[in-house]
Image: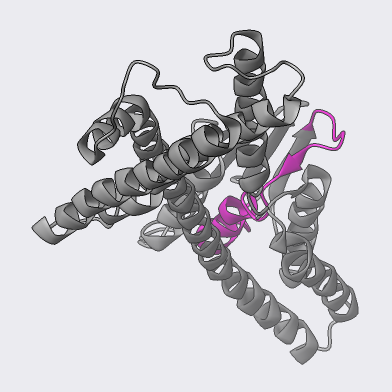
């Protein structure tokens, strides 16, 4: 996951623009008697006041907002926040007094208080609160909004990690079932010294390459998923010595569409495991209808008599959960589990 961009360049840009705006405004309409030729003084005066604004803003962020962003609040947290308010305005007042009374007036010979003959501490504090309270509020809003987005991002990252882990677990439930069944079929061929054993072993290696390599990705070419299904049918046919009766039909183009791996195979494997597959009068019917943006799988097979474990429980729940995670609001799955037949209609918007 990409790391978020650092914030400090944006903060630096904003405060630089504020400083330039204040210096330009002060030069255009000076509140104090500064010669127009003393550009450095305009920049210094505006820089100091911009620094005070930044102190009000960041003092609020780090001294006032931080104690209030700890989750469950207690009187101690409110106390630290109140102390942060006092500390923020104390620092602001100190910087203003130092700049205005120790630098501007004695060194540059001007101040902003021609109508006042004396300055008390109380007056300076009230004046600081009056002029800088809004930036303290801005700091609080910034801190709370930033924390909201941070929490949203963390929740999103946690959900992504949880989804990835859950998908990995769900996929892992599919692979052993396929592998054990296929190895058993090849073992039977080898035991009978069948000439089909080498071809079956080659097909198995191709399927394992797909399961162990390609299926680790979030999306694979639809053509590979279709090849996997066809190879699975061929391998099953070899294992049953051509006693497998399947009507497989593929319509539509394969033009680089992408799909989540090992989704379609669940239904086909289920038909082979729990359905009647050796009766030419009741073949397993598999129809894939493809477009550039959709996949429709229709599958129907006759059930073995008194079959109680037909894509139920964990198997169907597994597939439904993967579809919910991978294609939210972009799929429909209808399963008709009749006493004698099993019918599946799956639609995917790729």
**Location of residue 337 with respect to 350 vertically, above or below:** below
Which quarter shows the N terminus? bottom right
Residue 309 appears in which quarter of the rendering? bottom left
* Residue 345 appears in the picture as rendered: no
Is residue 100 toward the left or the right of residue 208 in the image? left
Expressed as whole percent of the image width and height from the top left, the position of residue 248 reads: 73, 42
* Residue 113 appears in the picture as rendered: yes
Q: Is residue 252 magenta?
A: yes
Which quarter shows the C terminus? top right
Expressed as whole percent of the image width and height from the top left, the position of residue 343 reads: 49, 40
Residue 56 appears in which quarter of the rendering? top left
Expressed as whole percent of the image width and height from the top left, the position of residue 173 reads: 53, 69
Q: Residue at x 73, y 24 (%)?
A: 38
Front position in the image: 343 or 2:
2
Is residue 15 toward the left or the right of residue 312 in the image? right
Front position in the image: 171 or 343:
171
Is residue 202 toward the left or the right of residue 45 in the image? right
Expressed as whole percent of the image width and height from the top left, the position of residue 195 reads: 90, 80
Q: Residue at x 67, y 30 (%)?
A: 41
**Location of residue 348 with respect to 189 vertically, above or below:** above
Q: Residue at x 80, y 59 (%)?
A: 231
Q: Residue furthest top?
A: 29
Q: Is residue 144 magenta?
A: no
Q: Residue at x 47, y 26 (%)?
A: 111
Q: How is the image coloured?
A: one colour
* The residue stretch that appears in magenta: 251-279
**Location of residue 189 with respect to 82 vertically, above or below:** below
């Amino acid at each position: 996951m990409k790391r978020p961009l650092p914030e400090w360049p944006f903060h630096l840009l904003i405060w630089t623009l504020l400083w330039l705006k204040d210096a330009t405004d002060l030069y255009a309409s000076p509140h104090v008697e500064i010669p127009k030729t003393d550009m450095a003084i305009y920049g210094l005066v505006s820089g100091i006041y911009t620094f005070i604004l930044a102190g009000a803003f960041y003092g609020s962020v780090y001294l006032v907002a931080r104690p209030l962003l700890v989750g469950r609040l207690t009187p101690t947290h409110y106390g630290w926040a109140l102390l942060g308010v006092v500390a923020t305005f104390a620092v602001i007042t100190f910087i203003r007094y130092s700049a205005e009374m120790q630098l501007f007036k004695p060194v540059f010979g001007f101040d902003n208080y021609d109508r006042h003959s004396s300055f008390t501490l109380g007056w300076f504090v009230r004046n600081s609160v009056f002029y800088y309270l809004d930036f303290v509020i801005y700091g609080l809003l910034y801190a709370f909004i930033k924390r909201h987005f941070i929490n949203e991002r963390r929740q999103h990252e946690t959900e992504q990690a949880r989804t990835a882990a859950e998908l990995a677990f769900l996929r892992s439930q599919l692979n052993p079932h396929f592998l054990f069944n296929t190895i058993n079929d090849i073992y039977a061929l080898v035991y009978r010294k069948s000439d089909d054993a080498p071809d079956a072993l080659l097909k198995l290696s191709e399927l394992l390459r797909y399961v162990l390599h390609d299926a680790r990705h979030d999306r694979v070419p639809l053509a590979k998923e279709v090849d996997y299904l066809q190879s699975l049918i061929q391998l099953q046919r070899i294992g049953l010595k051509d006693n497998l009766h399947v009507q497989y039909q593929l319509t539509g183009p394969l033009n680089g569409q992408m799909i989540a791996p090992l989704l379609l195979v669940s239904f086909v494997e289920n038909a082979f495991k729990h359905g009647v597959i050796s009766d030419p009068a009741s073949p397993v019917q598999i129809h894939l209808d493809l477009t550039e943006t959709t996949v429709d799988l229709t599958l129907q097979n006759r059930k073995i008599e008194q079959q109680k474990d037909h894509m139920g429980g964990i198997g169907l729940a597994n597939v439904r959960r993967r579809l919910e995670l991978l294609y939210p609001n972009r799929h429909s799955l209808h399963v008709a589990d009749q006493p004698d037949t099993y019918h599946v209609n799956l639609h995917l918007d790729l």
